[in-house]
Image: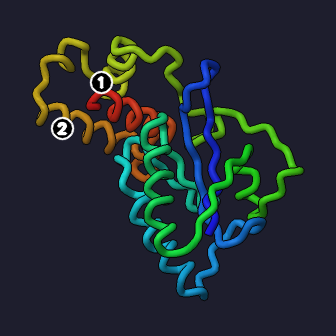
Amino acid sequence: MYVFFEHHRDPSGQITLTELRLSSYPDWLRIQFKNATENTAFEAAKVLLKQAPVAVRSCDTDLKVWSYLGSEWGQRTLDQLKAVISNITPVKFVEVKDLRMYAAVNRYDPSRKQEIKVEDFFYQHAPTVTVVSKESITIQLTKLLEVSEAELHAADKDTLKKLYRRACLKLHPDRNNGNGAAMSELNMLWGIYNA
């Protein structure tokens, strides 16, 4: 089995996003489900891929690419995949550039190159927080939760959950013509704020 992955880094070299996709082949990005060993390895991997909190993980079901925000969960998932899958079948990790481009054509060909832009991740034109500090996260979160900073700081755990759920119902793209970019930002900020 192959695990194709890509680490996206900020200008300082810190990992900001890890993307990965599983494959049974070194050049085709697909699983050989008719092979019992590959299928078993894939089923075990699916459990591991979902262990990260929802706030830091995403799956593009069309491209079959899993994404993990930050450095912790992406690397942790890769390490767990290596430990578990290697007990079922040999596994090779292949770091690539432009994983999404390869996933779109379902084939790994390192001679192909394509520029991927940050705004293409998750939802198109998703707003991003450029300066990550407690103050900037709080400011962005208060806008999305529609509360003041004082209300946010004074709220207990249950009240915070209610505010978050209310915002999710309003922003979720599957409900009431919600805003997918804002929902994605809310999940990211919520995960960081509660870490």
Q: In the rendered view, would you say 135 is above or below 106?
A: above
Label 1 residue SS: loop
Mark sitting on residue 36:
none
Report the residue marked by disc 2. 162
| Image quarter of residue 72 | top left
Tag nearer the camera, 2 or 1: 2
Mark sitting on residue 146: 1
Q: Which residue occupies 40% across, 51% down? A: 175
Going by the image, does 175 lie left or right of 23?
left
Residue 164: % across, % down: 26, 36
Task: Answer with left or right where residue 104 lies relative to residue 151.
Answer: right
Above-or-below relation of 160 to 101: above
Q: Nearer the viewer, residue 76 or 162?
A: 76
The amino acid type, in three-letter code, at marker 1 is Glu
The percent coordinates of residue 90 (x first, y second) are 58, 70
Q: Position of residue 36 (x, y in %)?
A: 54, 87
Task: Categorize mark 2 by other alpha carbons within 10 Å: few (<14), some (14-19), many (20+).
Answer: few
Residue 92 picture location, percent across and down? 63, 61
Q: How is the image coloured?
A: rainbow
Residue plotted at (33% across, 33% down): 190
* Picture layout, residue 144 above or below residue 75: above
Tell me which numbered mark, 2 or 1, is placed earlier along the sequence: 1
Q: Quadrant of the N terminus?
A: bottom right
Q: Quadrant of residue 102?
A: bottom right
Tell me whether circle 2 and circle 1 mark residues in contact (CB < 8 Å): no
Type of amino acid at the residue the image marks with label 2:
Lys
